[in-house]
Image (cartoon, grey):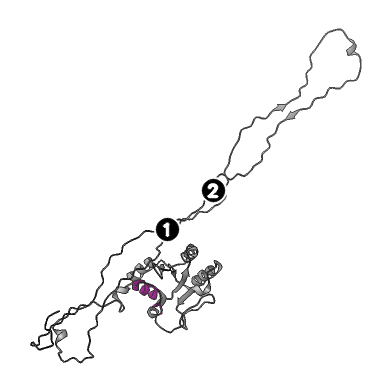
Amino acid sequence: MTYDTDIGTSGATSISALFDNRADADAAVARLNQAGVSSSQIRVEGDSATGTTTTPTATTSGEDKGFWDKLGDYFFPDEDRYTYAEGLSRGGYLVTVTGIAGTEYDTVLDILDDEGTVNLDEREASWRSEGWGGYESSAYAAPVARPVSDVDRTDLNRTDDDVIPIVEERLRVGKRDTQHGRVRVRAYTVEEPVSETIDLREEHVSLERRPVDRDVTAADTFTDRTLEAEEYREEAVVSKDARVVEEVGLRKTSETHRETISDSVRHTEVEIEDDRTDRPGFDTTKR
């Protein structure tokens, strides 16, 4: 999950990921350090016998407070904050990298999106199937404002300290990354039979004897003579050379689009009824 901590100004980004166990969280922190991410940028939250988990390569909050309050200074929508708190209460570990520069973003995201990371949407669905109600059914969700009724105005002898709080919801829009699949290219070696055709030449020596009947000449005198011939045969010589015939790689591109988020927010409205008779200095208008 990613969130812009200062939208529209500095553009500083934080990335958070939930892990099921300490080993996966520590492995992610180690890879972040190897990638050049400063330990001061990394926070780890998790459950242990003594409270907040601390790793040698990460800084964590040591305050003794509930998981919901512990995540209060994170820029999470309340729904995600409640889900992360539920994951921590079930023994999970939350790794957050803050102050990420643009050149570090893809590296940090790849590390925190690797195997071992909890898919928050799938985990939420699993918890709900077990009876978990989510943020909307929790005590942290904003209560529904009741309309002012006569029952609320029966006590006409309120003191100056009695007040009606005016509650107003404000819309906070953050961003989070959701996984949409992975592309992986793996190179391996295979062998396959091939064949080539070649013409090979052979030379053979054969002995020929043919009867003749002619007069002896000077060349036919009784002298020792030797005839000799060699046979030759061509053989196939096999050699192999390797050539690069194609290159395969992965290239990531990104694009930004603007989206308008529409929702509704609630606020408290107050209706004042003054049934007192006209007196100087008092306005009896309903408002």
Q: Looking at the image, which residue sits at the far left?
A: 277
Q: Choose between 22 and 212: the one closer to the eye.
A: 22
Decide if residue 222 is on the left or right side of residue 100: right
Q: Is residue 7 above or below residue 238?
A: below
Q: Choose top left, top right, bottom left or bottom right for residue 199.
A: top right
The amino acid type, in three-letter code, at marker 2 is Glu
Residue 247: image tag: 2
Quadrant (top left/top right/bottom left/bottom right) for the N terminus? bottom left
The label nearer to you, 1 versus 2, is 2
Residue at horizontal 21 percent and vertical 91 percent from the top: 160
Q: Choose top left, top right, bottom left or bottom right for residue 33.
A: bottom right
Residue 228: image tag: none
In the rendered image, residue 163, in percent from the top left (x then y), is placed at: 22, 86
Q: Element under label 2?
A: loop
Q: Element under label 1?
A: loop
Packing grade of label 1 (10 A; few <14, some 14-19, many >=20) is few
**Residue 83 forms part of the magenta stretch:** yes
Q: Which residue is mark 1?
A: 181
In the rendered image, residue 48, in percent from the top left (x then y), is placed at: 46, 80
The amino acid type, in three-letter code, at marker 1 is Gly
Decide if residue 33 is on the left or right side of residue 238: left
Q: Choose between 204 and 160: the one closer to the eye.
A: 160
Q: Is residue 73 above or below residue 163?
A: above
**Residue 137 forms part of the magenta stretch:** no
Q: CA distance from mark 1 to mark 2?
A: 23 Å
In the rendered image, residue 167, in percent from the top left (x then y), is placed at: 26, 79
Q: Looking at the image, which residue sits at the far top?
A: 215
Decide if residue 239 is on the left or right side of residue 43: right
> Which stretch did the figure color magenta?
70-86
